[in-house]
Image (spheres, rainbow, N blue to C red):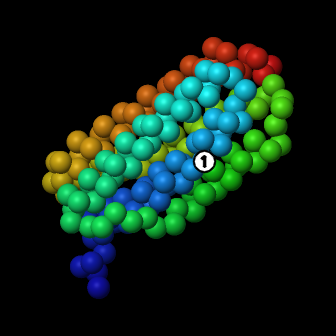
Amino acid sequence: MADDKNLRALFLHQLKDTYFAENAILKALPKMAQAARSDELRGAFAVHVEETREQVKRLDQVFRIVGEKPEGVTCQAIQGIIAEGEEVMKDFAGSDALDAGLIAAAQAVEHYEITRYGTLLAWARQLGLSEAEDLIKETLVEEENTDEVLSELAEDAINPAAA
């Protein structure tokens, strides 16, 4: 029993969790873009939709590398984070603070993804999955960059407009 509860099994579980999360994010991002009042924020969300599509393709490749079928397992964490974002869209619709709330919700998603990809990267290294490592690292860098873009947008324009 303990033999199948190893780092590879944990890696696969987290890979499936992340796959579910990315696909859920793909459904949520267009709604956030539509709700955004700022053209710049809508544009940032649109760019991230395209990046997320590519990230799902990379996860498909990682599944192939480890000899598994791409599939997700329900990720309660991302469902909760997305639900919070939907609440912000509803509660702050039409207000000057809406875009600030959307950025906060998007950054909660980004931070979750950064932790997941960081862990997957460390485990891929430990398991000697160098091909998977490269794909995961590429996505991790994109997630970090998106977080930075959102921070700059918030600090330079969105938060001052909301204040």
Percent position of residue 3, x then y: 24, 79
> What residue is at 18 percent from the left and 53 percent from the top?
129
Percent position of residue 71, x then y: 39, 65
Regarding residue 115, the answer to whether it shows in the image is: no
Amino acid under disc 1: Ala
Position of the N terminus, as image quadrant, is bottom left
Q: Is residue 135 left or right of residue 157?
A: left
Percent position of residue 79, x then y: 60, 57
Percent position of residue 155, x then y: 63, 18
Position of the C terminus, as image quadrant, is top right
Q: Above or below — where is 14 with respect to 50?
A: below
Q: Nearer the viewer, residue 27 or 160?
A: 27
Q: Nearer the viewer, residue 53 or 92?
A: 53
Q: Nearer the viewer, residue 37 or 158?
A: 37
> What residue is at 78 percent from the left and 22 percent from the top?
162
Q: Which residue is mark 1?
A: 28
> What residue is at 34 percent from the left and 63 percent from the top?
70
